[in-house]
Amino acid sequence: MKYSIQILVAIIMNSFPIMGIAQEEVFFSNPKKVTETGDSIAVIFSPTNNNIIAYTDRAYSKIYTLSLDNSVNANTRRSMKSISVVSEKSKSGFGFQWTDNGENIVFRAGEFGSSEVILVNIDGNEYTSLTEKVANVSIPILQNNKISYLKDGMLVSQNLPYKGARRHSEYNVNFFQKNGKIVLDSNQISPKNIACFLPKISPNLLSLSYECIDGSLYVYNIITKNTVLVGLGSNIKWSSNGMKLVYERPFDNGYEIISSDIFIVNIDGTNPVNLTDNIDLIVRRPALSHDGKKIATDIDGDIYIADLHGAF
């Protein structure tokens, strides 16, 4: 992956600590392997329960939920667990999301030319199709108790068919990705000379993150309208308080990824920390627990969860 000189300079400048301010060391400990499939990736914690995660497989063909017990096997050092298959619909694992109440998962399923948006409970036994099958529907965006998506190029927004969603504010942010552009209220907020994608709104609805094809990661402040380059990498995810981000920084040889590290950073791009600098493994797709005390990743097709210290 190649980066521009301007982006590299910005990252180097953001890597220096602020002089005169003591900074607590950020690190993880006690990692545990919680799957044994060799085909488990893209983990996301439940927004309401730090002991429940969801993940998919390498083909994004299924979604699983996994309930972690507080007890640990003394011999294997692995958490006790129970696994449910939530979806076996084609491509449902790419871009799936938890609803705010932690009781459902929303995903786009199907192949190009015939896809739909579906809501399912975490046991995988109650499906609700939110769209009929259409030629083209985008990955859905969730905020408050509403869902929005592009359906055949048109923005559609609707209420989710359940009660009890946690509301962070009384407004919704109208944003979407189209033709390599991130659009907010009809205005393009991403750089005009490069394709960007995967916009994600912070849990407090104050900022948007997105990724660009050159590996740059940005945060747009909805209130101040300022954009900050926060890092280089991919697979960015928010902390539950909307103040920090985690992401991976992979490197490839033109054919496959040969190394990858996990970073955590403030939303203004300050204090980036490489959490896996001393680990000779390809560590990918990080996610934070709701309380910020745990971090999950996938390594060689299995999910690992570790305790996170000093970040919050």
Image (spheres, rainbow, N blue to C red):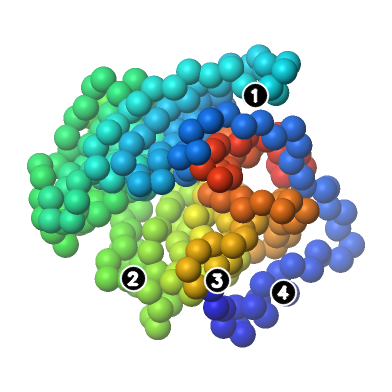
Q: Which mark is residue 253?
A: 3
* Position above or below: 236 against 14: above
**Going from the N terminus, do you reach mark 2 or mark 4 first?**
4
The quarter of the picture where the C terminus appears is: top right
**Which mark is on residue 12?**
4
Q: Earlier in the sequence, mark 1 or mark 4?
A: 4
Residue 258 in which image quadrant: bottom right
- Residue type for callout 4: Ile
Local SS, label 3: loop
Q: Position of residue 289 (x, y in %)?
A: 58, 35
Q: Position of residue 159 (x, y in %)?
A: 23, 37
Per the image, the residue denoted by label 1 is 78
**Nearer the camera: disc 2 or disc 1:** 1
- Work out whether residue 34 or residue 158 is closer to the camera in this orientation and state it: 34
* Secondary structure beneath label 2: strand
Name the residue rendered at 62%, 60% in the picture.
Answer: 259
How crowded pointer 4 is (Cα within 10 Å; few <14, some 14-19, many 20+) is rated as: few
Q: CA distance from mark 2 to mark 4?
A: 27 Å
Q: Residues within 10 Å of mark 3 (few under 14, many from 20)?
A: few
Where is mark 2, residue-wise? 181
For marks 3 and 2, give the CA distance: 28 Å
Type of amino acid under label 1: Arg
**Residue 59: percent from the left, percent from the top?**
35, 46
- Contact (Cβ within 8 Å) of mark 2 with mark 1: no
